Image: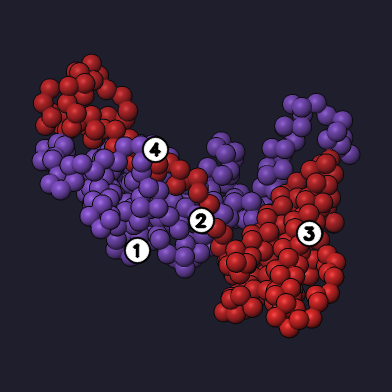
Chain colours: A red, B purple
Amino acid sequence: MTCDEFGRVLPELEGGHNLEQRAHLRVCPSCSELVAELEAISREARFLGLEDEGEPSPRVWNSIEIALRQEGLVREPLTTAVVPFPRNVGRRLTWLIPAFSALLLILGLLVYQNGGRRQLAESRASGVPAQPASVPSVDEQQLVELVATGTPSLRAEFESDLKAVDGYVRDAEESVRSHPNDEIAQQYLMNAYEQKAMVYEMALNRSVP
Amino acid sequence: MRPELGDLTDAQKSKNAKLSEAEAIDRAKQGDAGAFEALYHLHKRRVYSLCLRMTSNTAAAEDLTQEAFLQLFRKIGTFRGESAFSTWLHRMAVNVVLMQLRKKGLPVIPLEETLEADDESPKKEPGAEDIRLAGSIDRLQLKLAIQNLPPGYRTVFLLHDVEGYEHNEIAAMVGCSIGNSKSQLHKARMKLRELLKTNRAEKATRS
């Protein structure tokens, strides 16, 4: 089998080769390398399919909701409640609250540490001893100020992101309170917390030296 | 009154976990607003990611996501459960994207063409002989290279290698033969190989 002949059948092959094709690949480094590279591209591409490219903005759901009502597909008043499904849930949900609290505490400590270092530097410069600091409660406003100090242009973006994700969290928490056994509501809440953590992480990555 | 999950066996718990989406679908069929919203939030990321990969444009991806879900909700009464709901939705989203590409006059896939031997046999590429790809594909570079593919090649490559559709499914969706789908996929991979090697050669020259 020649390289030309192999090249002609290559589009038809999906990882499987007959005896003749395998024999050609054994003796032809060029075709062998081509096959390996094409397979590598295909393999890597599959990972792209698993990547999460994000989510659409809230206006998409708003537009869908409006269209559904206009088309008469919604037959009840719109509510924020999700469909109740009797489930035993408590175990799935209970770890979320301390985990999120721990995350907020860690973020609060980071904010404190950065504020503390600045305070120490300032006090050294001025000759005034620094006030002993205690760990503050997690304060989003402090985080906003930290972002604004390091990267003022990002403050508006961070505040906007925080506002949007807080709305999302509030809705999700309300859904779970209304329907504690609802698995979809729990998933909704998990997604909301993850998004809030991501907003914090992004803000800190950009502003903490 | 349904038994609490803790009282059930593992098999029954697994069965109940699948009822969650199924019940949302049933309620959506009856026009339950909360059910529509629940289904949307469950699947929005995957649909949006698909649309974004196929259009490389966030505004277009949002519009197509919206359209895909609207079509889904309009047709939800016809869903019989023969396939997984997510599979059904995914297919619908792909069709919405393909329809949009056709409306824009972009070639979804070139017409049937014969294979040309010159295009298929491995060539020695001058200046890139030492550049090997196998085992070290840069995913970001691959993403950029995909965006630079001709639209027809990109569609088939995305549907097959990225989204995992088989050639018979692609042929049915885009309206071509299975042979053409295979041919376009091969050409897409060859073109990507060329783009990746060129990129790597340029980087090697700069360093």
Task: Name the residue type under label 2.
Answer: Glu
| Residue carrying label 1 | B103
Residue B159: x, y in percent?
39, 45
Alpha carbon distance from label 3 to label 1: 52 Å
The span from disc 3 to disc 4 (Cα, nearest Å) is 41 Å
Q: Amino acid at mark 1?
A: Lys
Q: Residue furthest front?
A: A127
Judged by depth in the image, the label closer to the viewer, 3 or 2, is: 3
- Dividing the picture into quarters, in which one does residue B187 lie? top left
Residue at mark 2 to residue at mark 1: CA–CA distance: 25 Å
Residue B127 visible (yes or no):
yes
Pinpoint residue B98: horizontal percent, then vertical percent.
38, 55
Mark sitting earlier along the chain (3/2)? 2
Residue appearing at x 83%, y 64% in the figure: A135
Between marks 3 and 1 in the image, the one whose residue lies nearer the viewer: 3
What's the amino acid at mark 3? Answer: Leu
Q: Which residue is mark 4?
A: A43
